[in-house]
């Protein structure tokens, strides 16, 4: 939906005019968008995974949330401004996409975006996250990540991982208030520890040894 809206704005079309056109045809929406943009259907599906599942009339669906993606969140504002001149782009969000590697920004929490320059452990954790997915598969890593989030949150509430609070203080950049449980600073600060735990949980050999 946001992609169609951007096409309308960039081409000077009235709001919803292109959307209404796509709703009146009987071919899949991805085929219509491929014809309009000159991009292949496979390129569009990689960029907009919901198109792989969408019927012709996407407007009457629930936007077909891909099963591997949890929520929608704003794209990196610096990337969006550089590529299309619009900072209000919404994208499907997977935990591995919590960091923009190009601009070194945390983009994974409730639309809040943080500058991670100087936070090399968070940037390296994101690289590790991608390596885990290549090694073990997205499904296995996603399950491990969800379990690790619960484990690390419990550890943090009991004060057993002091490095998390150290990261929080740096990310707050001089502000004195402690972030709420859903704040970007807290999620970003926990992320390296979450990935370290998820790496263990996703490793079948480690799991076998732990249970033996």
Image: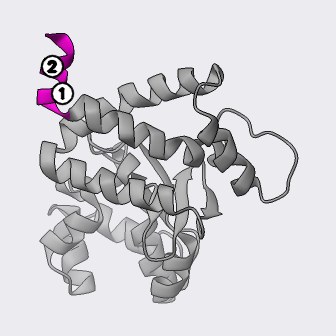
From the viewer's perspective, is 159 left or right of 144? right
Q: Check disc 2: other Cα within 10 Å, few if <14, some if 14-19, many if 20+.
A: few
Mark 1 lies on a secondary structure that is helix
174 shown above or below 202: below
- The answer to whether 99 appears left or right of 23 in the picture is right
Q: Position of residue 188 (x, y in %)?
A: 56, 49
Compared to residue 143, the image places residue 58 above or below, namely: below
Left or right of residue 66: residue 108? right
Which image quadrant is residue 70 in?
A: top left
- Checking the image for residue 206, the label placed there is 1
Residue in the picture at 47% in, 76% down:
6
Asked whether disc 2 touches disc 1, contact meaning CB atoms under 8 Å apart, the reply is yes
Q: Residue at x 59, y 46 (%)?
A: 189
Residue drawn at x 55%, y 82% is: 81
Question: Which corner quadrant holds the C terminus?
Answer: top left
**Which stretch is magenta?**
203-212
- The quarter of the picture where the N terminus appears is bottom left
Residue drawn at (45%, 85%) of the image: 83
Residue 2 quadrant: bottom left
Percent x, y for residue 164? 61, 40
Identify the image quadrant of residue 127: bottom left
C-alpha span from label 2 to label 1: 5 Å
122 lies left or right of 209? right
Residue tagged by mark 2?
A: 209
209 in magenta: yes
**Compared with residue 144, is residue 163 higher up or lower down, i.e. above or below?**
below
Q: In the rendered structure, does residue 107 fall within the stretch colored magenta?
A: no
Q: Nearer the viewer, residue 165 or 41?
A: 165
- Secondary structure character of the magenta stretch overall: helix
Q: Is residue 57 visible?
A: no
């Amino acid at each position: 939906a946001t992609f169609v809206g951007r096409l309308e704005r960039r081409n000077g079309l009235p709001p919803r005019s292109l959307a209404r056109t796509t709703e009146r045809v009987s071919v899949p929406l991805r085929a219509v968008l491929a014809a309009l943009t000159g991009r292949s259907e496979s390129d569009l599906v990689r960029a907009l995974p919901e198109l792989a599942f969408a019927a012709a009339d996407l407007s009457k669906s629930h936007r077909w949330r891909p099963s591997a993606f949890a929520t929608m969140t704003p794209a990196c504002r610096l990337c969006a401004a550089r590529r299309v001149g619009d900072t209000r782009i919404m994208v499907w969000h997977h935990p591995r996409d919590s960091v923009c590697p190009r601009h070194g920004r945390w983009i994974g929490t409730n639309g809040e975006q943080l500058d991670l320059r100087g936070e090399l452990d968070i940037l390296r954790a994101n690289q590790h996250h991608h390596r885990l997915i290549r090694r073990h598969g997205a499904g296995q890593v996603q399950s491990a990540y969800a379990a690790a989030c619960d484990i690390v949150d419990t550890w943090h509430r009991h004060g057993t991982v002091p490095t998390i609070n150290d990261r929080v203080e740096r990310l707050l950049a001089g502000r004195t208030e402690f972030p709420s449980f859903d704040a970007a600073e807290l999620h970003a600060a926990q992320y390296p520890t979450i990935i370290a735990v998820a790496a263990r949980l996703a490793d079948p050999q480690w799991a076998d040894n732990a249970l033996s």
